[in-house]
Image (cartoon, helix red, strand yellow):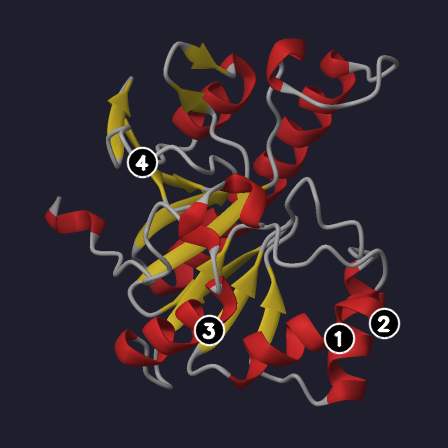
Amino acid sequence: MDKFGARWTDHTNKLIKRWRAVVNENDTVVIPGDISWAMNLEEAREDLRIIHELPGRKLIGKGNHDYWWGTVTKMKEFLDSEGFHTIDFLYNNATVAEDYIICGSRGWYVEKRLQNATENADYDKIVAREASRLRMSLEAAVKLREEHGGDILSYMHFPPVFGSFVCRELVDVLKEFGVRHCYFGHIHGNYSVPRSVEFEGITFTLIAADFLDFIPMITMPIDW
C-alpha cells in the first residue's frame, strides 16, 4: 500500500496499535473492503488472523481488490476451521450492532474514467447487480429494525457520491429505504476532502483507513 503515500508506511503496526487504543471487546468494527492482496482464502489467512486477534467483533464487506473473496458459505467454513470467531461478513445481509442495524454492499463507480476494470466490463449490468445486492441487504435490515429498532447504517466500499460523481442507481435505493447515513472506503491518498458530505438527505462519510490515519472512527450518527 506504500504506493498510495507516506501515510501507509508501516501501516499494519500503526493500525494494530491505534485499533487497540480505541476499540474494546464489546465494540463492533465495520471494515468496508480491501483488507488483503491475497488471491485466495489460504493466502488471506494471515491478514484475517491479524483482524481476528484485534479487540471487538468485525464485520467485513467486499472491496474491489478482495480477490480472495468466495461464497459466504466457504468463507464462513474457513473462519470456523481457523477459529476466527470474531469475524463475520457483510454481504447480501444485515446485522444488529449495538444500537444500529448494519447493512451494505460493494457498490461501483459507473464512470469508466473512475475504474480500472477491463474494457469489456458491462457497467450497466454491474451497477444493476450492486443495486440489487444493496436492496437485498436493506430488506434484511428493515426486518431486523422491526424486531430490534434502531437506525439503519449503510457501509459500502465504493462511494455512491464523491465530488461531482453520483451513482444514481445506488443513491435511489438508499433513499427508497430512508437511509440517512452511508459510509465508504476506497478513496486513498486524498486527505483534503471533507470527511462527510450531505446529498439529497443522506450523509456520506469517508472512512478509508489512511484518511482516518488508521484510527477506527466511532460511529454516532444520530448526534451529527
Q: CA distance from mark 4 to mark 3?
A: 21 Å
**Which of pointers 4 and 3 lies earlier in the amino acid sequence?**
3
Of residues 82 and 94, the one drawn nearer to the viewer in this rendering: 82
The label number, if any, that marks residue 213 in the structure image? none
Give the spatial CA distance, label 3 vs label 1.
17 Å
Q: Counting residues from the N terminus, which is met first, the one under dot 3 or under dot 1?
A: 3
User: Would you place residue 129 above or below residue 223 in this image?
Assistant: above
Q: CA distance from mark 1 to mark 4?
A: 31 Å
Look at the picture and state if 133 lies above or below 50. Answer: above
Q: Position of residue 159 (x, y in %)?
A: 47, 30
Q: Position of residue 96 (x, y in %)?
A: 43, 65
Task: Determine contact: label 1, label 2, CB under 8 Å.
Answer: yes
Q: Residue at x 48, y 65 (%)?
A: 10
**Residue type at numbered disc 2:** Glu
Residue matched to label 4 = 191
What quarter of the picture does the C terminus occupy? top left
Decide: marks 4, 2 in contact (CB < 8 A)?
Answer: no
Q: Is residue 209 visible?
A: no
Q: 73 left or right of 185?
A: right
Position of 184 compared to 118: left or right?
left
Which of the two discs, 3 and 1, sits closer to the camera?
Answer: 3
Task: Tell me the SS state at disc 3.
Answer: helix
Q: Secondary structure at mark 4?
A: loop
Q: Quadrant of residue 55?
A: bottom left
Residue ID at (75%, 84%):
80
Q: For the residue labelled by badge 1, is the local secondary structure a helix, a strand or a loop?
A: helix
Alpha-carbon distance for marks 3 and 2?
22 Å
| Amino acid at circle 4 | Tyr
Report which residue position mark 1 lands on.
Answer: 45
- Precedes in sequence: disc 1 or disc 4: 1
Identified by mark 1, the residue type is Arg
The circle drawn on residue 13 is 3
